[in-house]
Image: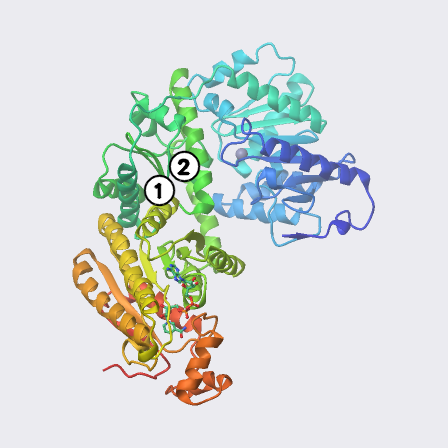
Amino acid sequence: MKIDVTKRTGGQADSAVDKALADLIRVSNLVGRDPALVQGGGGNTSVKTSDGKYMYIKASGTALKDMSETRGWRRMHLDSVLAIIKDKAITKLQAQTREVEVVNRLLLACDDNVTGGARPSVEAHLHGLLDKCVIHLHPSAVSAYLNAKDGKAKLEKLFRGEKIQPLWVPYVDPGFTLARKISKLVEDYRQQFKRMPRVLFLDKHGLFVTAPTAGATLRLVRQVIERCGAALRPPAATRTSPPDRDQIRTAAFCVRKAVFEATGTYCPVTYTDDRMVAGFERCADAKKLLSCGALTPDELVYSNGPALWVDRCDAGAIAKRLSAQIHEGRKPAAAFLVKDVGLFIAGTDKIAQTIRDIVAYSLFIRANARRMGGIRTLTRAEQTFINEWESEAFRMKLVSGESQGELKNRIAVVTGAGSGLGRSIAAGLAKAGALVALTDIDQKAAQETADIIFRAKSKGQAKVIRCDVTNEDSVRETFEELLAQWGGLDILVNAAGIAPPYALVDMPVDKWRMALEVNLTGYLLMAREAARIMIAQGMGGSIINLSSKSGLDASKNNTAYNATKAGELHMARGWALELGEHGIRVNCIAPGNVFEGSKIWNPEYIKVCAKKNGIKPQEVIPFYVNKTALRREIKGQDIADAVVFLCSDKARTITGQTLVADSGQVMVR
Ligand SMILES: NC(=O)c1ccc[n+]([C@@H]2O[C@H](COP(=O)([O-])OP(=O)(O)OC[C@H]3O[C@@H](n4cnc5c(N)ncnc54)[C@H](O)[C@@H]3O)[C@@H](O)[C@H]2O)c1
Ligand SMILES: [Zn+2]
């Protein structure tokens, strides 16, 4: 989204308008950064201009804390916003069509120079009905009451002496129906009390607080939270024996496999344990507290309902439960509370934090609501409305052309990712949707690769991990870091290699040994660790050894390289035999000469090649290109494409093979 700040007020200097925006940003940032007020990112804010013409409101897709003068808001014509609620024609539309129409109308009511399609909050019409400044939140301190059987009565008691009585809003479907309902209730309230309400409690949803100034609204929201929160407490307790590394690993593998079996999709899994999680688990009825459906639209939409209680790590049994949820037309759970271990979230880095926050929020509410007569969740019909609303939004996203990526969310490790082919392959995997650990001894170079992937706006993600492939401890730590980040492994690409260019008669033995260390021992150590993990996961996998055409066809002055590159091919064949029964495929790629970005093709190496072929250094590249049948220079992308193919399901019957990607220089014998 881009905003031309100078044009914000339609070219006219208007201090009322500027003040309203400044107030909105200040209120939003203060509220958004206060963990007592915002959990799981929900909530929105608005401020109307003093002339009553405009309303500045938070835009969807930006967190309150991240809003700024140039980001995260829209300015709307107040009259047009209010006209939507009054429009009788809209009420006649079928529910999902109606909500799409309302969003379009809200967009049409925007009057600013914001480009890039940021939508005003879907609760904008509610804000339009209230006083000048509005803060809407879903705070756990309030939701504990809004989701409890005796919650309404308790709130009434808490606020009994107040001069301005809170307005209670019974649950109705969010969106247009809720706006109409509130419009009616506010009108009734006005009739009864001859004034506007200040505090609105929305059943199973959240809190609206409104006042004529930003300062008064802020003070009020804090008072409400403080009063509601005073009687609540988190289910905090520590574990008597904390889980060990293997328990956590096994549980993560189990969750990941269950999601894969039930949905056919790959998903990273992250682990959390804290006092809230451990404390909740200690509740004698923890399992029951989680078995009663979603509390709020947020919980339904972001974590697909409450965390699934897992007594025992059995992927098949969990998969069955997830399949049953899908069968009932629900989205499968994204959070798993594993007894005696902790909380596991299935979701990419982008949403995992939100899901974790929502789960913590839900555990707090559930543990407290049970002390207020029991938990009240969304009914089947209420859930169906939200699910359909969501699937409509999802369908529109699909229509907008967002493709999934061939290796979506598969977890990959690439060695030597800081340069040349390792870099190109890592970028290619990320482009295909994989989550890629970029490992190299040169961490700075690997970070540059991460920056390239980030700038390319790849579908996947990248994480830099320093690794010396020749060192057992370093290799082990690399995979530990990877598992802590994403909880599994699907792909290993061995690419870190060296090529000491010496004639046999000149070969220094230390250079020879170094090549054996990196090109053979390094490949072995990485594959050994990867295979152990993949076997334990039971989800198959793909290992690629980046060999070379020199592994098939020896070249001069290249003893160590010829030997090790041939060794990599043969190691892969043996591994393919050993690992086949676990569904793990092992293949090699033998690239021809790839000059682009390679440190192997350094000026010294080029000189050696020039000398052995009796040509000038600048003639080396065309010389080698001319040796190929296609007369085509091979680029990093060409090799990356071959790797993506071999790692994908399209290569499902290919194992123990060598794919020669050399523009036709070496015909395999
Ligand atoms: N470039 C080519 O023409 C070509 C052709 C065929 C095969 N290959 C193979 O591709 C692979 C990469 O070649 P390149 O040309 O991109 O090389 P490169 O030198 O540009 O990149 C190799 C990377 O490996 C890293 N590395 C070296 N030792 C390491 C260690 N012990 N632990 C971790 N990382 C280490 C380096 O820091 C570097 O970032 C090699 O295995 C090579 O044999 C290259
Ligand atoms: Zn809301």
Residue 310: image quadrant is top left
Q: Tell me, what colour scheme is on the image?
A: rainbow
Label 2 element class: helix
Label 1 element class: loop
Report if the CB atoms under discs 1 and 2 are less than 8 Å apart. Answer: yes
Q: Is residue 308 above or below residue 4?
A: above
The residue at which mark 2 appears reads as: 383
Q: CA distance from mark 1 to mark 2?
A: 9 Å
Q: Position of residue 98 (x, y in %)?
A: 53, 45
Q: Position of residue 188 (x, y in %)?
A: 62, 23
Horizontally, residue 662 falls left or right of residue 586, namely: right
Q: Quadrant of the C terminus?
A: bottom left
Residue 58: image quadrant is top right
Q: Can residue 199 be seen in this snapshot?
A: yes
Q: Residue furthest bottom?
A: 614
Q: Earlier in the sequence, mark 1 or mark 2?
A: 1
Q: Position of residue 482 (x, y in %)?
A: 37, 48
Q: Position of residue 253 (x, y in %)?
A: 28, 45
Residue at 44% in and 34% down: 358
Horizontally, residue 490 falls left or right of residue 147, namely: left
Q: Is residue 608 above or below residue 350?
A: below
Q: Residue furthest top?
A: 161
Instruction: State the mark number for residue 330.
Output: 1
Q: Is residue 668 above or below residue 547?
A: below
Q: Nearer the viewer, residue 186 or 70?
A: 70
Amino acid type, label 2: Gln
Q: Which quarter is ligand 1 in? A: bottom left
Q: Badge 1, how many Cα within 10 Å: few under 14, some, many 20+?
A: some
Amino acid type, label 1: Arg
